[in-house]
Image: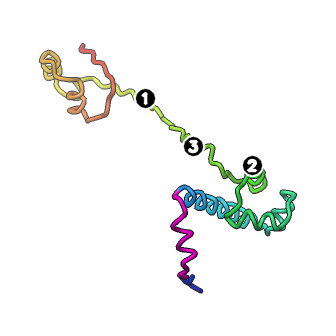
Amino acid sequence: MNKPKRHKSTIIQQLQQNRSAADFEKTKKRMMLAAKIADAKKAKGWSNGDMALELDQHDSVISKWLSGTHNFTTDTLFDIERVLDINLLNWDDAHPKEIVHKYEVSVSAKAADVIGASYLKDSIVKGESLHHYIAICGGMAVTSASTQIN
């Protein structure tokens, strides 16, 4: 495997120094977009010619798109998404949906079967919390509960 060589050039250094952070970010995103398109094209087993045929374009246009320097229109991106069956703009990822599952569990037990009835009556009279009682009975997580003393 050939490793890329570093080239030292004053012209390249000057260009890099004059480049703004915003321009660098745009270039980076264009390259990432081109790579995503190229990966999807490859996953379909298509050549540039196959993709060009599907999009009614010339092979050279597809090559330009995959260079990472092309400034796409939204219509072009929508067409690419359609033929490659991919999501380039990540509309669904922009607003992640929170999924909440709620479960309700009802447990019934006679207090006398768990602890002595005298302890239960004494603890309620003394104002000890129901959560303390539940912890003694097995430590289940409860958000609400009620008791009935017979």
Gap in angstroms between the C-alphas marked 1 and 2: 44 Å
Q: Earlier in the sequence, mark 3 or mark 2?
A: 2
Q: Earlier in the sequence, mark 1 or mark 3?
A: 3
Amino acid of disc 1: Glu
CB contact under 8 Å: marks 1 and 3: no
Quarter occupied by residue 55? bottom right
Of residues 42 and 20, the one drawn nearer to the viewer in this rendering: 20
> In the picture provided, is 3 more to the left or to the right than 137?
right
> In the picture provided, is 146 more to the left or to the right than 60?
left
Residue annotated with mark 1: 104
Q: Is residue 30 above or below residue 117?
A: below
The x and y percentages for residue 102 are 46, 32
Residue annotated with mark 2: 78
* Colouring scheme applied when the structure was drawn: rainbow
Q: Identify which residue is drawn at 78% across, 51% down.
A: 79
Residue annotated with mark 3: 94
Gap in angstroms between the C-alphas marked 3 and 2: 17 Å
Q: Identify which residue is drawn at 31% across, 22% down.
A: 145
- Label 1: state its secondary structure: loop
Residue interval drawn in magenta? 7-21
Q: Earlier in the sequence, mark 1 or mark 2?
A: 2
Q: Residues within 10 Å of mark 2 (few under 14, many from 20)?
A: some
Q: Is residue 88 above or below residue 19?
A: above
